[in-house]
Image (cartoon, rainbow, N blue to C red):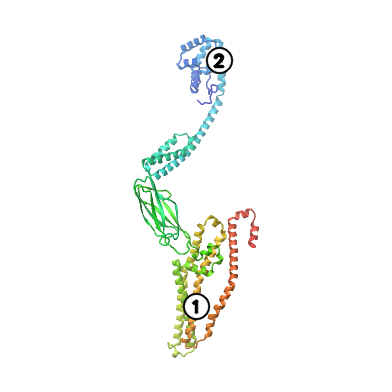
Amino acid sequence: SPPWTSRHSMPMASLIWHKDAAGDGDATESAACGAAHCWKLPRTDAVSAALSQGATGRAEDELVDREEGAPQQTPEDFMDEVIAGWDNGRTISFIRRLVEKRPELAATVGKLAKEVGKIAKDAATVSEVAKEASEVQRSRVGEVGEDAGDVAIDVENAEKDVGAIAKDVGEPEEDVGNLASDLGEAVKEVPASDLRRSARRSITFAGRDLKDELGDKEPLTIIQFSSKMYFCAQDAPCMVLEVKRTGDVSGHSEVSYATSDATAKAGHKYVHTEGKLTFEPGERDQVIEVTIIKTKGWVGALEFNVELLPDELSGATLGRYLSKARVKVIDTTFFPTNKSQRFINQGQLAYIPRWLLLVEYWKFNWQNRIVVKGTIKWVLVEQMHSLYLMLKLFMNIYLIDYILQMPEHQLFSKGRATELSILIAAHLIPFALLHLLDYRKLTWKLSGVSRMTLQECLLRRYLNYTDESRASWERGEILMCMARDAPMVAHSGYMCLLKLSNHFGELLAIFIFQLTAPALFDKPPRLLTYVPMVAFPLLLVPCLLLRQPRTIRCETAKEGKQNVLIDQYSKTVDNYRMIADFDQRPQLLSWFER
C-alpha cells in the first residue's frame, strides 16, 4: 500500500459492514475482506492470531470467552483494537457475536459504525488522490525516460572514449566491444539519478584501468619526435631531429621517415631525405639529419616537414601528436643583401646610399631563375628595337638621297618601284616581329615574379615577427606596403633599369649611325651632331640631383598621408556598426575632408 495511507483513509466506498445497511451479512463480510486484504491494516495480537488461523464460529466464541475473562477494557480501547485488527471478513462475525454476549458494548460498536461510514465518505477524495498519484507516477516515468536517454548518450560517448584508448594501446576491436558491453551493463544497474553525475567519471576510470590492464598484458612501445617544431639557421649545414622510443624498449623496432615540402622546396632550400631508423634492444634515441642548402640573399623564414611513416613500422606504435615535425629555417640576412647590415643595426636607414640599395636590389632579383631568364630576353628584345631604330635611320637616308633623286638606271635594282617595295618590306617585317615580341614580354613573368617575391617575403616576415614588432605596425602601413610599395619597387626599382638599358641602346645606335653614315653615303662628317649626345646628359644629371631631395620629401609625405587614409578607412569599415550607433558619421566625414 502507498506509504501515505492510514487506517482512517481506506477506500471503502462499497463497504458497509453493518448487517442492516448491507442486507446480507455474507456480502458485507466479503467486501470487508477485500478492503482489508488490499490495505494490509496492522492488527492486535489477539485478533490477528484468531483471524490468521481462519477461525470458525466456535473459535470466535472461545476468543470472546477469553475476552470475558480478561481485564475489562474501556469502549475507546476496544474500538481502537477492533479497528487495528480489521484484516479479514470474519471480523464482522466476531464483532456480532461479541455484542450478543456483551450488550454493554453496543454503544461502542455503533460509534465504530459511524467511524466506518465517515471513512466511506472519504473514498471519493481518496480516489482523486489516487488519480493524481498516477499522473505523478507517469510524469516521473517520463523524467526517468529522459534520464535514460541522457545515460544512453553518456554510454555511447564512453564507448567512443574506450575505443580511442584501446586504439592507443593496440588492443583488438573485439576486446573493446566486450569492454564497452560490460560498461553498458554496469551503467544500467546504477540508478538514473546517479548516472548523470558519475557516468563519465566512471568510464574515465574504467579507461585508465583498461590501459593499466593492457599495459600489464602487452607493454607499449611508442616512437615519436622529441618536439613538434625545430629551428635552424639559414647557414647551418644540416638539421638534426631527435627521434625517441619510450615504453618497453627491450625489443627490436623499425620506422621509416621522409621529408615533404611546405614553404621551403626540396632542391632549393633543403635536400629531400628519406630512410629507415632501427632501434636495437635497449636503444631509446635516434636522429634524422636533413641537409640545408645555403642560399644567398633575403628570402624570409621557410619551413618543411619531416614525418614518421606507418607503412613499414614494426615493434612499436607511432605517437599520436609527435609523429610529424616542422622544421623552420630562420633567415638571418638583411634586405636586399647584407651590404646594408651595418646601417640597419645602428638604426641609420636614412644614411644608406641609394645607389647601393639599387645595385643590391638588382642582385637580389638575379637570384631568381625566372627573373634572370626574363631579364635576358627582355634586354635582347629592347636591343632589337635599338637596331631597328638604326636601320630606319639608314633607310630614310637611302630613300631621300637615292630612291627619290637618282635616275632609275643608277639604282641598285634598276627600278624605282622595286626599290620602294624592298624598303617597305624592310620597315614592315621588323615592325611585325618586334610587335609580337613585345606581346610575348607580358608572359615572361618578369615584373610579376619580382613583385610577388617582395610581397611573399614581407608577409612571411610579418607572420614571424614578435608581438611587440607587429604592434608597432599600423594596418594602413601593412596594406600599402603590400599593395603600393612592393609593386612600385618592382616596377620603378628593377623594370626601370631595363628601360634605361633600352635608352642607352638607342643612344648607342644613334652614335654608331653618326659615325658610319658619312662613310657609307659619301658625306662629310659633322661634329655638331655629337654635341646633343654629350650636352644633354651633362645638363640633365645636375638638374636631377638638385630636385631629388624635394622630390623625395614630397613623395614621402604623400605616401604617409596615403597610409593614414587607408588605415582610417579600414578601421571605418570594420567599426561601421559602432559609428552608426553612436552617430559619428559627421565627425568622420569632417576628418576625411580635412
Q: Position of residue 533 (x, y in %)?
A: 53, 80
Question: What kind of element bears circle 2?
Answer: helix
Mark 1 lies on residue? 506
Camera-side residue: 332 or 369? Answer: 332
Camera-side residue: 506 or 344? Answer: 344
Instruction: Give the Cα distance between marks 2 and 1.
Output: 140 Å
Mark 2 lies on residue? 77
Indicate which disc residue 27 carries. none
Above or below residue 241? Residue 513 is below
For the point 51% across and 33% down, the residue is: 140
Q: Amino acid at mark 1?
A: Glu
For the point 48% across and 10% down, the residue is: 62
Task: Kindly check if marks 2 and 1 are in contact, taking CB atoms under 8 A apart as contact.
Answer: no
Q: Locate the C terminus by quadrant.
A: bottom right
Q: Residues within 10 Å of mark 2 (few under 14, many from 20)?
A: few
Q: Can residue 482 be seen from the camera position used here? A: no
Q: Position of residue 79 (x, y in %)?
A: 55, 16
